[in-house]
């Protein structure tokens, strides 16, 4: 009898709870669920992008991690911030004093109400995440990618310089990059426009064929200086903040770049007179041999120079040493140009393979 009485008491309540809410009540339920999640979406996505970008441009560059790893760490940070700031967003939403659907506890358990709430959550988080993408307006993702690729290739080039030192048996090895500057065409037309009036600023200025003057030329690029990007030597005056700089046209490296072929000289050769001693710690007589090999681009333009100073044992560098540097130079050329190319990874692998082949050849 007691169980029957309890059953009779529950039955009317269940019947009363089965009453479906109106469309207006469901709309209010959806709105109540949407607004807070807009805030959550904005905070979550904005923090994920900002944190991921900061990690990608710093930690991932140093440790050579992927962008997906940066995104995963950024997601952890944004989730933790969401937990910490969740009550703040809820308090702000409460202050808006939005209309609330008057539903009983039983009505809130109905499937229609739960679906309306879930739809509001999904709608709110979607809108919030879209708005939270605003940091992308000023983040330069390409700059980060270029920095990562540059760091990877620079690390490889450092290895090339260090390996070249042992491969050719030099006391010093270095790689100079050719830095260019923009200059206006070194000519003007005289009054009758019939012949060019060349303005020679130095002996290195070359005459330009008259036919080329008919084509509009705004700016030309001219080599300005050689900058040592990678050095394995105590012979040069340099530190981490002040790179070695040689004016283009001075030094044996410039000689190799201008001749567009290797220069292999030792004490007594005429080419030794071109040594640029301002960048060296040692005296002129302490440099008894030097070899410089140009690095070419696809269009056969000199973009860098590999240099070795002082062959160990007191003798000059051999033809085999020149061959070794030329082999490295051809692969350095591919790797240098791969900074803006798609096949960078293949270029790095090929260069590493070439170093291993040359090391094995030198050990025979």
Image (cartoon, rainbow, N blue to C red):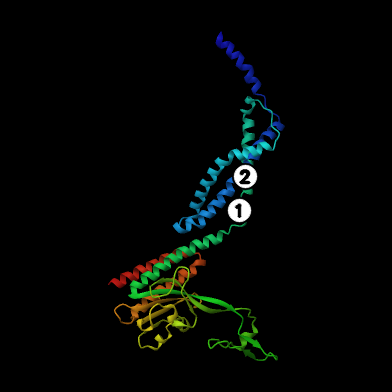
- x, y percentage for residue 114? 62, 32
Using the image, determine if residue 38 lies above or below residue 7.
Answer: below
Is 333 or 180 nearer to us in this picture? 180
Residue 358, given in percent of the width and then of the height, sits at: 34, 71
Residue 70 % position (x, y) = 50, 52
Q: How many marks?
A: 2
Q: Of all residues shown, which one is farthest toward the left?
A: 364
Q: Name the residue carrying label 2.
A: 126
Name the residue: 41% across, 64% down: 349
Query: Mark 2 touching mark 1, by CB under 8 A?
Result: no
Residue indicated by mark 1 = 135
Secondary element at image label 1 = helix
Quadrant location of residue 355? bottom left
Q: In which quarter of the image is residue 28?
A: top right
Q: Nearer the viewer, mark 2 or mark 1?
A: 1
Image point (58%, 59%), residue name: 140
Q: Quick check: 161 left or right of 88?
A: left
Q: In this view, does 118 lie above or below 139?
A: above
């Amino acid at each position: 009898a007691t169980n029957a009485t309890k059953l009779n008491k529950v039955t009317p309540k269940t019947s009363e709870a089965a009453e479906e809410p109106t469309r207006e009540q469901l709309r209010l339920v959806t709105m109540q669920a949407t607004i807070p999640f807009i805030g959550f979406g904005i905070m979550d996505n904005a923090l994920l992008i900002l944190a991921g970008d900061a990690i990608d441009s710093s930690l991932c560059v140093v440790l050579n991690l992927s962008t997906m790893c940066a995104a995963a760490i950024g997601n952890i940070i944004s989730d933790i911030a969401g937990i910490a700031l969740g009550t703040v967003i809820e308090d702000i939403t409460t202050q808006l004093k939005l209309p609330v659907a008057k539903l009983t506890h039983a009505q809130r358990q109905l499937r229609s109400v739960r679906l309306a709430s879930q739809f509001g959550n999904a709608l709110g988080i979607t809108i919030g995440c879209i708005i939270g993408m605003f940091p992308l307006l000023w983040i330069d993702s390409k700059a980060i990618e270029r920095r990562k690729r540059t760091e990877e290739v620079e690390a490889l080039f450092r290895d090339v310089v260090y390996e070249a030192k042992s491969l050719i048996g030099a006391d010093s090895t270095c790689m100079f990059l050719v830095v260019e500057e923009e200059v206006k065409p070194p000519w003007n037309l005289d009054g009758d426009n019939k012949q060019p009036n060349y303005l020679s600023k130095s002996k290195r200025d070359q005459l330009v064929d008259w036919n080329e003057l008919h084509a509009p030329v705004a700016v030309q690029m001219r080599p300005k200086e050689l900058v040592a990007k990678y050095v394995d030597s105590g012979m040069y005056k340099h530190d981490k903040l002040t790179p070695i700089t040689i004016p283009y046209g001075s030094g044996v490296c410039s000689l190799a770049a201008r001749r567009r072929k290797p220069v292999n000289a030792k004490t007594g050769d005429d080419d030794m007179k071109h040594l640029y001693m301002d960048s060296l710690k040692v005296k002129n007589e302490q440099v008894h041999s030097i070899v410089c090999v140009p690095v070419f681009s696809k269009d056969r333009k000199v973009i860098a120079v590999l240099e070795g100073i002082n062959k160990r044992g007191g003798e000059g560098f051999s033809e085999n040493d020149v061959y070794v540097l030329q082999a490295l130079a051809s692969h350095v050329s591919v790797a240098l140009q791969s900074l803006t190319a798609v096949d960078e990874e293949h270029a790095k692998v090929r260069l590493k393979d070439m170093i291993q082949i040359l090391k094995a050849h030198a050990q025979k």
